Amino acid sequence: MTESPATKLVNGDECPRVKNGLKTERNGLEKSLHRCHERQPKHHCHPEEEEVHAASHGGLYSRPFIESFEETPMLVAVFTYMSYGILTIFGYLRDFLRHWKIERCNIAREKEEQKDFVPLYQDFENFYNRNIYMRIRDSWNRPLCSVPGAKMDLLEQATHDYNWTFHYTGRVMHDVINLGSYNYLGFADNTGPCADSAAEATMKYGVGVASTRQEIGNLDRHEEMEKLVAKFLGVESAMTFGMGFATNSMNIPALSGKGCLILSDELNHASLVLGARLSGSTIRVFKHNNMQSLEKLLREAIVHGQPRTHRPWKKILIVVEGIYSMEGSVVRLPEVIALKKRYRAYLYLDEAHSIGALGPRGRGVVDYFGLDPCDVDVMMGTFTKSFGAAGGYIAGKRELIEYLRSHSHSAVYATSMSPPVMEQIITSMKCIMGEDGTTMGCERVRQLAKNTVYFRKRLREMGFIIYGNEGSPVVPMMLYMPAKIGAFAREMLKRNIGVVGVGFPATPIIESRARFCISAAHTKDVLDTALSVINEVGDLLQLKYSRRKRQPSLARPFDDNVYEDIDD
């Protein structure tokens, strides 16, 4: 048995593994068929799946950690590159026709007299938008006419100039199954206790505060909400902001600056990337969820220090997400915390998608792994997903929060959170915690976990390639070819299913996908209907790329036995 870097653990121990000639996976660990013998009987073993056990990682994991990233089939990758190549050739041909006024150009461009100024429109960057994205633009930007619940109403739109402009026909598409919204726990609704509380707050406080928190925009409900958030997360203190994106982009510059080092996951959200850039810190990127890559950067940072001067870094900040919204993967938080402690770095955890959606109590990825919240230095999250509201929060030690109250641009200059939005957060959070006197919140957390496992299992059985962690409600289904993004969205909408397609540059060029977001509001019948349609469209567009052995999936109803795999 040979020894490789992948067999060395974070705590310095070694776990012997057998190399079987398979390729190294994204997370840097060897794909080993020998893991099959360690798994529970209910789990199917495949070489692209990985399950981490507590015994193999020095007791860091208290539960199995299974993620699946099946390799792109070679023929599919070749045809995908060919598709982009053909679209690029025709794009340059159409640009040539537009240049000579043979074809009308509808996109903004620089005037000739402005050529010496800094360009407002980067022609090369807009090439993709006008020649590729514009072909499938009708798959997005559809106005909703209802709440984003399990089903929704969409306003029909049409175009007569190949998606450059749209007009609305006036027809409303009713009861479209919603597989695209981040309404994980189903709190984004217009009925129920949350809606009633928001209405009462509107009558008492109005809609807007018209001031910042530091002036006369600090309401008693703001104080109550922040105490509730801190209690919910199990930390000393918390503060809230009116915009989730600004929570990251405006607070990271307050925490890190010149002479500091930020280690960022390569798939971090744009708000984290922007915040890191605005901070003026040195930024180094490690491979997605790859602990070997992260540890290598940490070692180099400690050994070499700052460039040129070799002085120690003032601060090393590791920035990760709980659930990565395009991959559906969950951060390897136990290993990240172990590395952070070993190298005395700080940890910034973005739980935008994981808070409320993961963990037996809905407390996020920290709760999911059963870890101590105090081990995370900066806990960030948003209220836009599981809570059905808007805004974000930063939580941690009291000293951290007091510092941000006077140094964060988002706290000093931004208008206070709207009272009805604030009331929606308070009511939904109390519901999850059980402080409303009911078990509705806990039931929704469990229902989301059940729906997620069931939906992922059935898609795999049909033959689709599914990315991500088995517990993630974000379910990416691979489409690969650019033309199939639009075709899949259109065919699904014809069958009354609303989905979200994602392609380059939001994903790697050959990894276009449909991204399903599962909700606790989805019933058995709704999921089975959606799965039946996905199966039908998958056959029509030939999307079943998986090389696994297929199993019959739609011949049976919703299987409650699948829930036995979930740890409550």
Image: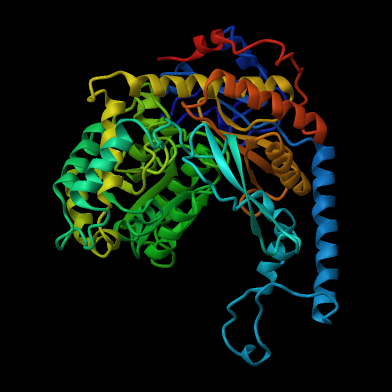
Q: Is residue 555 visible?
A: yes
Q: Of residues 110 and 287, which is closer to you in this image?
A: 110
In the image, residue 487 sits, relative to residue 84, either above or below, namely above
Does residue 170 appear left or right of residue 52 in this picture? right
Q: Residue at x 26, y 57 (%)?
A: 208
Figure label count: 0
* Placement of the C terminus among the 4 image quadrants: top left
- The x, y position of residue 522, in whole percent, is 52, 25
Q: Position of residue 446 (x, y in %)?
A: 42, 19
- Kindly indicate the quadrant of the structure image that contains residue 432: top left
Q: Is residue 235 left or right of residue 290?
A: left
Vertical order, 322 against 17 (above or below): below
Q: Nearer the viewer, residue 492 or 408?
A: 492
Residue in view at x 36 percent, y 47 percent: 390
Query: Can residue 27 be seen in this snapshot?
Result: no
For the N terminus, give its image quadrant: top right
Dividing the picture into quarters, in which one does residue 516 lie?
top right
